[in-house]
Amino acid sequence: MSSAQSNRAPAVPGNDRSLPSTAAPIKAIRLRHPWRTVFAVIIVLLAVTFILDAAQRPAYDWPSVAKYVFDRRITLAAITTLELTVLSMVIAIVLGIVLAIMRLSPNPVVKSVAWVYLWIFRGTPVYVQLVFWGLFALIYKTITVGIPFGEPLMTFDTRSVINTFGLAVIGLALNEAAYMAEIVRAGLLSVDRGQEEAATALGMSWFQTMRRVIVPQSMRIIIPPTGNEVISMLKTTSLVTAVPFSYDLYTRSRDISAETFNVIPMLLVASIWYLLFTSILMVGQYFLERRFARGVGDRRPDRKSSATRVLPIVGAHQATVIGTPATSGQNPRLGRGRNENDE
Amino acid sequence: MSDAIPMVLAEGVTKSFGSNEVLKGISLEVQRGEVMCLVGPSGSGKSTFLRCINHLEVLSAGRLSVDGELVGYREMNGKLFELHPKEAARQRRDIGMVFQRFNLFPHMTALQNVTEAPQRVKGLPKAQVERQARELLARVGLDDRADYYPAHLSGGQQQRVAIARALAMEPKLMLFDEPTSALDPELVGEVLDVMKGLAKSGMTMIVVTHEMGFAREVADSLVFMDGGVVVEAGDPAVVLSNPQHQRTQAFLSKVL
């Protein structure tokens, strides 16, 4: 409750919702929660026991972990995994946006094509799809460019055009695009129809309306699940061995452990790198979400900006309106930033 | 540009949603500089008619022209051709619209809301657009709120920004779709004041409203609609104080 309201309270006797700020704070014995403490102690004890045990258990072989975590083969594989993730996600997002718009299209053919795409690529395991892509060069030995039913203009040998890395990227991206399409579609549909109408009424074109009005607002809905997908993709890259592409983090560490006959430390090495990348992605997502929360009654405003934003609602010439006894207390509808008023 | 051409000319405008006929042949004229209030019970088709004027709804039958130009179609050799979306958008530029629920762009500040269309649609330079936008915000009494996001403005302030946004395109006609219906009672006045100022400046306005006081004071003509037809039209003072038609009487006895 704001201090402005507390100061007005004496003028409104019987308004028990806003206590005068001069009132003594309540003195009461706090309710004890002994079980909370008990559980907390048990959990901490278990965790410490596990960590201490793990630190000295020979099977984990921490010296080997330390030796291999910055091994050149591993760091290169980590970079390759990042490349796989970024490239396939970028393609998936672009294709996902196209598919989402296709699904919302008034053209029934366009709509069905998008639907069938989703049906196939969401309906089969990504591992199976990756194996298929690995066999692509066997199924389609040459790639021909030309007009359907006409003379071919150009013909390539498939293997010369695309390597296993490219096939892995395509496999991951096409699968992911199906999921991204649904995320983008949900985001586009979440924007109030009045927004499109307002933009149209101003004479904005469809493309301008999408780019300037609809898409920026749908980003708020799209980003959290997309962050999820990126993290998921980072880990799904470990399946590219199905293509077979073997320079990613997981496959590489498995290959090394096949030489050293010491599997567990290599798994830890790979996990450490995956965790590091995931953590970085989570930080990135936080900032992206903050960027696109502009203008929305933010759920967790940083203190400084929330203070300046509360002012205009209660401030200036409207204070007299709110302050009259008849309407004192709260008027949540007055300022549409509900969250600020509720605090 | 001749004064003889009315700003809005509707002839037998009909609109159906499926089998539901919402407008059953509306014919009316709005002259240059005229302020017309459309009143009537909800579901009478007032808002639909308003939305037909800037082609947010497509007519089922009849003709509608703004400033002598057919809305949504081009007539050639006695045949109607549907307009390309680009041409429809060009027509809408000259018609400002204010919505019941404001529909401000929530991710843009008040100033950006006002500058968006002139900058993107008309392609005017940023500095010029911003100067004009600040003047417009001052005109609706919100020059000190330029950098606030809509969520941090009151309903009345948001609607005034919405009016400034529509004015930024320098429209020749302004449509208001129940602009004060979503507002708390104490905020209605500030929006109506802006609209009164606009009417005084000579803007042609069509206002769907339940504010009979505003209609009486500002409007040049008042149209009462019910069940998709114009029941009664004329001088607001006459229609409001001495309604001829039974349905008008029944409606006014409830709202006045």
Image (spheres, coloured by chain):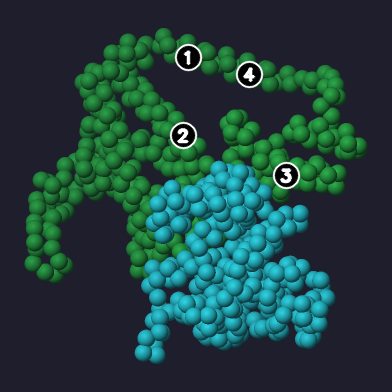
- Residue at position x 69%, y 61% in the image: B192
Left or right: residue B210 compared with residue A279: right
Q: Chain of mark 2?
A: A
Asked whether the residues under the numbered discs 3 and 4 touch, taking CB atoms below 8 Å apart as contact, a structural biologist would say no
For chain A, the rendered hue is green
Do the residues marked 3 and 4 share a common chain? yes
Chain letter behind tag 3: A
Residue occupied by mark 1: A51
Residue B181 can be seen in this image: yes
Q: Amino acid type of disc 2? A: Phe
Q: Colour of chain B?
A: cyan
In what element is the residue under mark 2? helix
Q: Count residues near mark 3 (Cα–Cα under 10 Å), then give few for <14, some for 14-19, many for 20+.
A: few
Based on the displayed image, in which of its 4 quarters is residue A317 positioned?
A: top right
Q: Looking at numbered disc 3 in the image, what kind of residue is underneath it? A: His
Which residue is disc 3 drawn over? Answer: A317
